[in-house]
Amino acid sequence: MRVFYVVYVGDEAIASHLDAIRLICNPDEKTSAHVTVRGPYRQRFKMPVLTREVTSEPVFVSGVGNFFEHRQNTVFLRCESDALRRAWFKRDYPYNPHVTLYDGSSAAFARNLYARIQGVKLSFCFEPTPLKALVSRRGQRDAEVWMRLNYALVSQVAGYAVTAEAIRNMTEEERLKIAVRLAKHLSRIVSGRKCAWCRATASREKDDVVAESSRRRSRQLEPVAFEAT
């Protein structure tokens, strides 16, 4: 058993798209979209301080990357967060936070996915969940991944009613087309959109600007004392 500590995507709309892309690309996917921050460990730990740390700032997504070296077939979204950097501890890997879209056995599929999806503008931010333990065991299966899949979203994007059986029987070309459509659909809904943390920060900055402007006007209107002659 290996234990990793991860953050999940706190925005339901974004999470639904990413989970759908992962499952469409790889029906054997075992987990929901996440960023691995720490691990592996051989047991669970309580990490209240680090949990507060990782949720103190949003995670920024800045496009698509890949791990194609060393026989890897991985396509992912690049992520960045100063809070994740401070909490980061992965014994075998340098700091490189990401959300995996595909990590499977087909090199051809991975390269086709990367070639098609890298042209989609995927730049947005999301609020991360607190750190959660993700236990990895050989041969594990997670039925909840299929239960959480937003079939209505996938059907809307695909243009026909999509079922679990249909997903398992898709050709690679069908998987690629739907995955790219989901990525484009996500790009449209997040265009110009800010997460709650960014909106709150922008609101505070606006309030600070208004307050400072008000203080300046008040100083300009203060009466000036003149010495009597």
Image: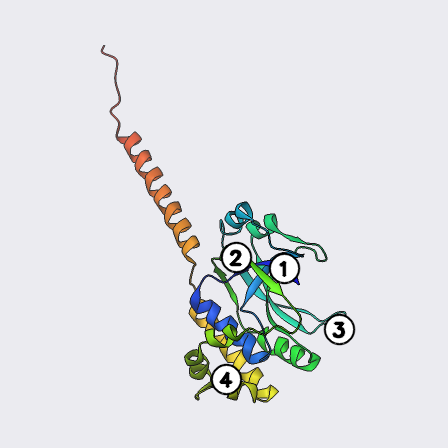
- In the displayed structure image, the side of residue 198 where residue 97 appears, left or right: right
Question: What secondary structure is marked by label 2?
Answer: strand
Q: CA distance from mark 4 to mark 2?
A: 31 Å
Please state the total of marks drawn on the protein image.
4
Three-letter amino acid code at the position of disc 3:
Arg
Q: Which residue is mark 1?
A: 3
- In the displayed structure image, the side of residue 22 where residue 214 appears, left or right: left
Label located before the other in sequence (1 or 3): 1
Tell me, yes or no, whether the two marked residues, 1 and 4, touch with CB atoms within 8 Å.
no
Q: CA distance from mark 1 to mark 2?
A: 22 Å
Tell me, yes or no, whether the two marked residues, 1 and 2, touch with CB atoms within 8 Å.
no
* Closer to us: 173 or 10: 10
Three-letter amino acid code at the position of disc 1:
Val
Q: Which residue is mark 2?
A: 59
Label located before the other in sequence (4 or 3): 3
Q: Quadrant of residue 224?
A: top left
Q: Is residue 155 above or below residue 188?
A: below
Per the rendering, the mark at residue 71 is 3
Q: CA distance from mark 4 to mark 3?
A: 29 Å
Category of crowding for the residue at label 1, using alpha-carbon neighbours closer than 10 angstroms: few (below 14), some (14–19), many (at least 20)? some
Residue 148 image point, x, y percent:
46, 73
Q: Which residue is mark 4?
A: 164
* Closer to us: 218 or 197: 197
Q: Quadrant of residue 135?
A: bottom right
Category of crowding for the residue at label 2, using alpha-carbon neighbours closer than 10 angstroms: few (below 14), some (14–19), many (at least 20)? many
